[in-house]
């Protein structure tokens, strides 16, 4: 099983930017295409943005079937019930259901 350490890839305790997420995405994509079981480690990451998560993980769910990702990708360094875990779940949910969230955003913009 391979491990991708986000801290080692981006050389920062803060995973905030789209280009950093893109770097991680390319590594994850290569592992999934090859069918390798992979651990994505958040160990050492103190702050993480949804922009980073969308670029790194959300994109995977737009390209690969959910069951394939879930069979090959696990996470380390995310505590149960943590804010990071909650953000990650929302990113995955939005990637799997983009139409539902587009409708919510459109509705909110009409109200404003």
Image: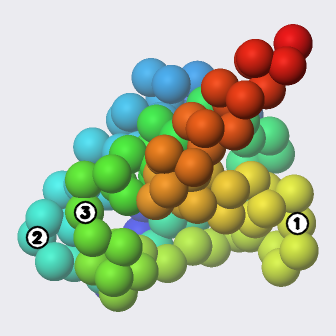
Query: Can the viewer see residue 42 in this picture?
Result: no
Q: Does residue 66 lie above or below 109 as drawn?
A: below
Q: Earlier in the sequence, mark 2 or mark 3?
A: 2
58 relative to 31 in the view: left or right: right
- Label 1: which residue? 82
> Of 4 and 82, which appears nearest the observer?
82
The C terminus sits in image quarter = top right
Distance of label 3 from label 1 (alpha carbons): 26 Å
Distance of label 2 from label 3 (alpha carbons): 12 Å
User: Badge 2: few (under 14), some or many (20 or more) residues near its Cα, within 10 Å?
Assistant: few
Which residue occupies 57% across, 49% down?
100
- Label 2: which residue? 34
81 relative to 68 in the view: left or right: right
Q: Does residue 3 lie above or below 55 as drawn?
A: below
Counting the numbered discs, the total is 3
> Of 84 and 23, which appears nearest the observer?
84
- Label 3: which residue? 64
């Amino acid at each position: 099983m391979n491990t991708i350490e986000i801290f080692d890839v981006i050389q920062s305790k803060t995973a905030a930017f789209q280009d950093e997420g893109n770097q991680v995405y390319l590594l994850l994509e290569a592992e999934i295409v090859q069918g390798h079981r992979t651990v994505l480690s958040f160990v050492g990451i103190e702050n993480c943005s949804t922009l980073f998560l969308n670029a790194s993980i959300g994109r995977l769910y737009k390209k690969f079937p959910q069951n394939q990702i879930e069979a090959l990708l696990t996470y380390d360094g995310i505590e149960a019930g943590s804010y990071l875990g909650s953000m990650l779940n929302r990113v995955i949910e939005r990637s799997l259901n983009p139409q539902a969230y587009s409708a919510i955003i459109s509705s909110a913009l009409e109200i404003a």
